[in-house]
Image (tube, rainbow, N blue to C red):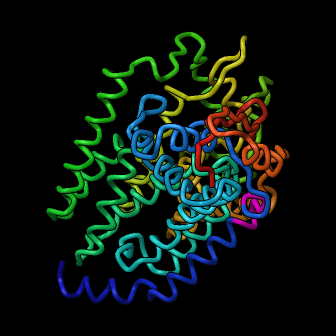
Amino acid sequence: MSAITNHQERHSGLTPWHQGAVFLAACVILVSRRPDAVFHAQFFAEDGHIWFADAYNFGWLPALLRTQDGYFQTLPRLAASLALLVPFSLVPLVLNLIAIAIQAIPANLLLLGRSSVWGSLRYRALLAGIYLALPNCFEISFGVTESQWPFALCAFLLLAACAPQGTPGRIVDLAVILLCALTGPFCVPLFPIALVLARKRHDRWHLVLSLILAVCCLVQAWELLITNPSARSHYANALGAAPAPFINLLAGNVYLGAVIGGNSLAAHGNPALFAFFLFVALVGTFIIAACLLKSPLEMKLFLFFAAAILAASLISPNTGVPNGVTAWGKLAISGGARYWFLPTLAFAWSVLWCFRSRISVLKFISAPLLFLMCLGILRDWRHPAFTETHFAESVQRFKAAPPGTLVTIPEYPAGWTVKLAKHPNPD
């Protein structure tokens, strides 16, 4: 990298002290959106049922090598392993704090000098602000299980940034990319992105990252397709894929979700409403297409990344489907679900980019959308608190149980439980 580029990086990012302040501010913002995650922490779904239960019952290392839903899920398993170090009463809080920290990190990455490829510091601050206030994303705040989605954003931002110049930066990048690649299927779309960046920037660093991602793709694919091919749901005709439901999902849960917040409008079958959805889908796709044609390479790659994740989510959603309901029918009522997070963010960032462009028609379309997005942010600011599961009472039962007893602890959502075989030497 040239001396001029190094100089630009030093003057287009924040100092370490400022980065620390941004991280704390981001954490405060995230906690304000769901304060019960800190002040009344409880287990959520896989957080307790799988990650912590496996770490406690089998030991942290054997649990780390177990797969879930056809993939290695290293990030939440590492978080559960760390939670073994604290008293049982603090485990949900520790898991939630880890999730909040992970969710805050993308704001810091956008404000690094290395991220100047995205634009000015002021523009990147706006991107970070939209990310932290994003509507239609309440499921991302549920716990460490959903942390893989913002962590995938961290991996992408590090890929898109300029190559680190020192050994500490390279170690951090390698650790994040490797951990993300071994947590779910995100390595698959990240691999071609790394190859494109390696070719465009002519640096060996992205070739190294491409090689790591390629190996991890093979590991994840081997586990999913060869070792455990039945781990993912196979919907066949129950998927419900068709052009009309796709337009409803794209317009209702992605485009309108970014503007007005989480909703279940896509579940309505009114023909008049479909005409509205078609209009929204055309306008939203026009904005995406304009951004794809005119924006810098990094934004183009992010749109590809979000589109690939959306496509994979619709092809193979991991969601329980009641009898008589298709998988897409279930997704239609799932406003704020994890599957909409990256596509919603991509559309929100595209609207901001269009507003800053010099093309008048893009400004004309994006200005009212930004105004409506502000209303959507206010509407969706507070995420729903968990239903009371009386975790404090479960802690007392667990402490009082004789060693070897299988203790069942209720968690959110209703019907989920954590089953722990009491150790001889409890905390």
Q: Quadrant of residue 418?
A: top right
Task: Locate residue 366, reporting x and y percent.
Answer: 63, 60
Q: Is residue 33 magenta?
A: yes
Task: Locate residue 383, reporting x and y percent.
Answer: 77, 54
In this rendering, does residue 362 appear at all?
A: no
Q: Is residue 45 above or below residue 369?
A: above
In this rendering, does residue 79 appear at all?
A: yes
Q: Quadrant of residue 39?
A: bottom right
Q: Is residue 293 above or below residue 23?
A: above
Q: Is residue 152 above or below residue 416?
A: below
Say which of 79 and 246 sits in front.
Answer: 79
Left or right: residue 20 versus residue 278 is left
Which residue is found at the position 38% from the left and 80% from the top? Answer: 113
In the rendered structure, which segment of residues is drawn in magenta? 31-37
Say which of 158 and 307 sits in front.
Answer: 158
Q: Is residue 148 above or below residue 372?
A: above
Q: Main secondary structure of the magenta part?
A: helix
Task: Locate residue 194, reporting x and y percent.
Answer: 27, 53
Q: Is residue 86 magenta?
A: no
Number of numbered tags placed on the structure image: 0
Task: Locate residue 181, reporting x and y percent.
Answer: 35, 47
Which residue is found at the position 53% from the left and 29% from the top? Answer: 314
Q: Quadrant of the C terminus?
A: bottom right
Say which of 77 and 174 sits in front.
Answer: 77
Which residue is found at the position 50% from the left and 16% from the top? Answer: 234
Q: Quadrant of residue 409?
A: top right
Which residue is found at the position 79% from the left and 49% from the top? Answer: 396
Q: Quadrant of the N terminus?
A: bottom left
Left or right: residue 374 versus residue 239 is right
Say which of 77 and 379 sits in front.
Answer: 77
